[in-house]
Amino acid sequence: LDREFLVACKPEERSGLVASAEQVDRQLRELRRAHPSATVERLAVLMALNLTHELSALRQAQSERDARLERSIGELNRRLDMLLDTTGAGRP
């Protein structure tokens, strides 16, 4: 929103920081269009809430994917154990 801030970071982190700053600026501008009379502080809080909600949703989705993957691996291990038991391949 036409404000600049000096932020220290390692040289290898600069491009990621710049990309993040550009994303923050885009989101603040979208919020400003939706809420033209809101203060910058209110817009920042709205954006923080939006980002936190999005992060929570992503974490939940990741957790669900991890659980599905764990179940699938468990099932594959169970099948492999059964196959090895029936073929005798798992015996010394």
Image (tube, rainbow, N blue to C red):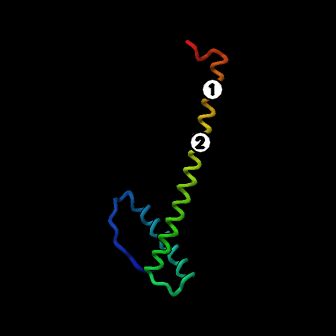
Quarter where residue 92 is shown = top right
Q: CA gap, disc 2 to disc 1?
A: 16 Å
* Camera-side residue of 84 and 25: 84
Q: Nearer the viewer, residue 76 or 18?
A: 76
Q: Is residue 26 above or below residue 13?
A: below
On residue 69, the disc is: 2
Residue 59's place in the image compared with 72, above or below, is: below
Q: Dot 1: few (<14), some (14–19), or many (≥20) neighbours within 10 Å? A: few
Left or right of 85 on screen, residue 9: left
Find residue 88 and report its horizontal and vertical position in percent.
Answer: 63, 14
- Which tag, 2 or 1, sits closer to the chain's start? 2
Count of numbered marks: 2
Q: Mark 1: which secondary structure? A: helix
> Residue sitting at 46 percent across and 79 percent down?
42
Image coordinates for residue 3, horizontal then vertical, percent: 41, 79
Tell me which residue sits at (65%, 23%) in the image. Answer: 82
In the rendered image, residue 30, in percent from the top left (x then y), is placed at 55, 77
Q: Secondary structure at mark 2?
A: helix
Q: Is residue 89 left or right of residue 43?
A: right
Q: Residue at x 51, y 61 (%)?
A: 55
Q: Position of residue 34 (x, y in %)?
A: 57, 81
What residue type is disc 2 on? Leu
Q: Which residue is mark 1?
A: 80
Seen as rendered, the residue at the extreme left is 8
